[in-house]
Image (cartoon, rainbow, N blue to C red):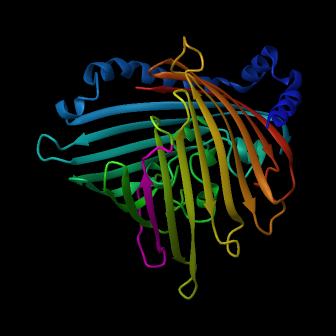
Amino acid sequence: MPSIIINIIGDIGLDITVVFLCKRIINLFSMKVVYKTVFIVGTLSVLLPAKVNAQQDVDDKANSPVSLSASYVGDLVSNFRGGIKKGTAYLGLLNVKADFYTSKWWKGGEAFINIGNTHGGEPTVDLIGDFQGVSNIEAGNLTFLYELWYKQCFGTACVTLGLQDLNAKFAVNDNGCLFTNSSFGIHSSIADNISSPIFPLTALGVNVQWDISNSFSCEAAIFDGTPDDFENNPYNVGWKLSKNQGFLAVTEFQLKKSLLRGMSGCYKFGAYYHQHNDTIEAIQKNGGFYFVVDQQITDKLFVFSQLGLSPEKINRNNYYVSLGFNCRGLMAKRPDDQFGIAVACAGFHNALVKHETVLELAYQFKVNKNIFIKPDIQYIINPAGTDVKLANALVGFIRFGVTI
């Protein structure tokens, strides 16, 4: 791996310089993009004092039945070489959320709504042509209902009903959240092989979670098997359930126990089965397995790994595997910063290339509890999102985020 990193740094050459980035930013930010970005960030800044006054700590769940929050994430992405073509794009994601708690009336109830807006360019589609997705917020220009659900807990069990994101509860990779490539959030073998209710297009579902003990839990859910796409359901508010749409069933077991004494750890195993009808006569069936490992090694170092397996006879992406390391508080004066390096490989059966492999390096600067800035570099070997063979791509990011 050190030799790969050295080669990548060599490839970057003089492209990554202050002058280059300044020129890219000036060329990119047309007045329309500037106005939109300033408006969104300015709105969040205006709302921030109200948020602080209304909710000063976590105890507000007990004191107030309503919790409001918002977040904005922006990506400045440049493809330096390879892929479809060189170029730069800006894209953003705005989320506005509301939580409603029933503790003043009855115990264990919570309702949640999350409205999303994505805007800007599509670097995977227009510049890179990769399969896994270099940015986990890329979705085009959409405004949509992302989540709308009610959860009721009964002792050690909880039931959630409504519009849900599968990846909010299943196949979650806690230490992979540092990285921007989509596969570190959800296995490509799940995202590509079936109609998954994941960002940005979620689906109706029922989820049951049971904490069997302090360290072992089981979770199962069933979702609409064919979420209606944005072309037919532009705001994700018109849902249809029918026999032909089928269903997606997912089950996951979690062991929250460390292999190393005094450290934290979590091990997950899941299976899924998907069925829907292309026609009245033809029933399409698919499924697979996945594993997720999150393990603390030292007080600052964490490791994670993902594995996904699907039948190769009916899936082009028949396996997925990843490995990554996070270091938190690398510098004593910046305990909240994170540095990470990770590799993700999507394997293919009967395809133009045998695999697409991504190497990602990221460093997240925590400006304060509400703002972060994250430079990020990805090197994509065999970009496999098109029907033609593309040269390896070198991609640079500057991501920023604001939460209130």
Q: Is 223 included in the stretch rendered in magenta?
A: no
345 and 81: which one is in front?
345
Left or right: where 355 falls relative to 328: right
Q: Residue at x 85, y 44 (%)?
A: 392
Residue situated furthest left in the rendering = 105
Please say whether residue 251 is one of the residues in the magenta stretch: yes
Image quadrant assignment for residue 380? top right
Q: Main secondary structure of the magenta part?
A: loop
Q: Is residue 64 left or right of residue 96?
A: left
- Residue 69 in percent (x, y) is at 36, 32
Seen at 16% across and 41% down, the residue is 103
Q: How many marks?
A: 0
Q: Going 45% across and 31% down the picture, which residue do you hit?
A: 71
Which residue is farthest top? 333
The residue sitting at the bottom extreme is: 281
Does residue 51 appear to the left or right of 199 in the view shown? left
Q: Quadrant of the N terminus?
A: top right
User: Visible in this render: residue 203?
Assistant: yes
Residue 180, can we see it?
A: no
Residue 157, image x and y in percent?
26, 56
- Residue 17 image offset from top left, x and y in percent: 81, 17
The answer to whether residue 155 is above or below residue 80 is below
For residue 47, which quarter of the picture?
A: top left
Residue 259: horizontal and vertical position, in percent? 50, 45
Rendered position, 344 above or below 53:
below
Q: Nearer the viewer, residue 161 or 218?
A: 218
Say which quadrant the C terminus sits in.
top left
Q: Which residues are magenta?
A: 237-259
In the rendered image, the vertical position of residue 371 relative to residue 119, given as above or below = above
Question: Going by the picture, which residue comes out furthest to the front?
Answer: 261
Q: Is residue 251 left or right of residue 349?
A: left
